[in-house]
């Protein structure tokens, strides 16, 4: 299994809602990442988990709350988002923080719309 | 100045042409270099991964890294319409994968 699976694929939420994005991988990777991608822009790093511990937070607003329940799962909890948070949210994983010998594997993303 | 510079294009070439995509970077701390392909509304797909200067070939794709010049390239031979996508260079330093702006490529039949 060489996939990173993200659910849901699409999400529309109001500014007062609470929702969660989920990411799963079964490649034995020990580093997992959340990226945000706006239209016609490259992905931007949000969070890095290494061995299930948060190792990097790129000064992301607290309305985004990551969680790594185990080595295969990564969640992103969303609360009180703004319309400008609408974007494609990508999850990625790698053998370890340097990408090992195989780089980073990305999921297909969750397209989030905040109304 | 961005850490990783990539011409966003767009780039349009006829089918069968050789495509050359390039990135430059400013930080010598980058150690691992990748090229991703991203189709519209999809996640990035890893095409090539390398960590040393020189060339790496995989089918129609060749990745080239010149660490002394801080310059990386991706060559696509015998380009196909299915190669039409955005190509992103990316490189790693201190657990961070940093992307170039991406080049939008169209291969015309």
Image (cartoon, coloured by chain):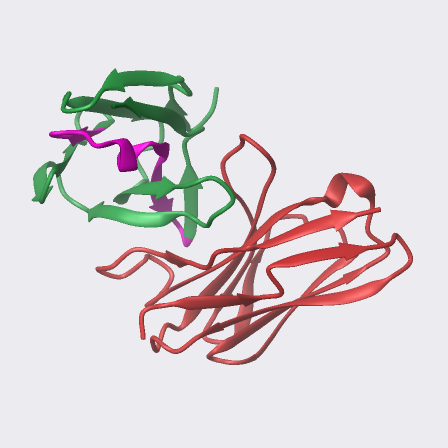
Chain colours: A red, B green
Give percent across and percent down for residue B108: 28, 21
- Residue B6, above or below A78: above
Give percent across and percent down for residue A8: 62, 65
Classify residue B106 by image quadrant.
top left
Classify residue B7 by image quadrant.
top left
Q: Report the residue that reaches farthest toward the bottom.
A: A70
The residue shown at (15%, 20%) is: B17
The answer to if B84 sits in the magenta stretch is yes
Foreground residue among A73 and B104: B104
| Residue B1, visible in the rendered structure | yes
Residues rendered magenta in the picture: B73-95
Quadrant for the C terminus of chain B in the image: top left
Foreground residue among B30 and A94: A94
Foreground residue among B40 and B91: B40
In the picture, measured across the screen, residue B3 lies left or right of residue A12, that is: left
The residue shown at (91%, 58%) is: A16
- Residue A75, above or below B56: below
The residue shown at (27%, 35%) is: B83
Give percent across and percent down for residue B104: 40, 26
The residue shown at (32%, 69%) is: A2
In the picture, measured across the screen, residue B54 lies left or right of residue A49, that is: left
Foreground residue among B17 and A39: B17
Give percent across and percent down for residue A81: 82, 51
């Amino acid at each position: 299994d060489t996939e990173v699976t993200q659910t849901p694929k699409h999400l529309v939420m109001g500014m007062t809602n609470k929702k969660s994005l989920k990411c799963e991988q079964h490649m034995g990777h020990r580093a997992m990442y959340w990226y945000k991608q706006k239209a016609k822009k490259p992905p931007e790093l949000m969070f890095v988990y290494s061995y299930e511990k948060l190792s990097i937070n790129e000064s992301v607003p607290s309305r985004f709350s990551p969680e790594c329940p185990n080595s295969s799962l990564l969640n992103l909890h969303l609360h009180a988002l703004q319309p400008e948070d609408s974007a494609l949210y990508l999850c990625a994983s790698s053998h370890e923080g340097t990408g090992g010998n195989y780089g980073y594997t990305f999921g297909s993303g969750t397209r989030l719309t905040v109304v | 100045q961005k850490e990783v510079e990539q011409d966003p294009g767009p780039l349009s070439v006829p089918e069968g042409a050789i495509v050359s995509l390039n990135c430059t970077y400013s930080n010598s701390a980058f150690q691992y270099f990748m090229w991703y392909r991203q189709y519209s509304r999809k996640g990035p797909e890893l095409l090539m991964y390398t960590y040393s200067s020189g060339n790496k070939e995989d089918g129609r794709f060749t990745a080239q890294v010149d660490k002394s010049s801080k310059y990386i390239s991706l060559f696509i031979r015998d380009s196909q319409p299915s190669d039409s996508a955005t190509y992103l260079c990316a490189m790693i330093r201190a657990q961070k994968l940093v992307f170039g702006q991406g080049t939008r490529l169209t291969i015309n039949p």
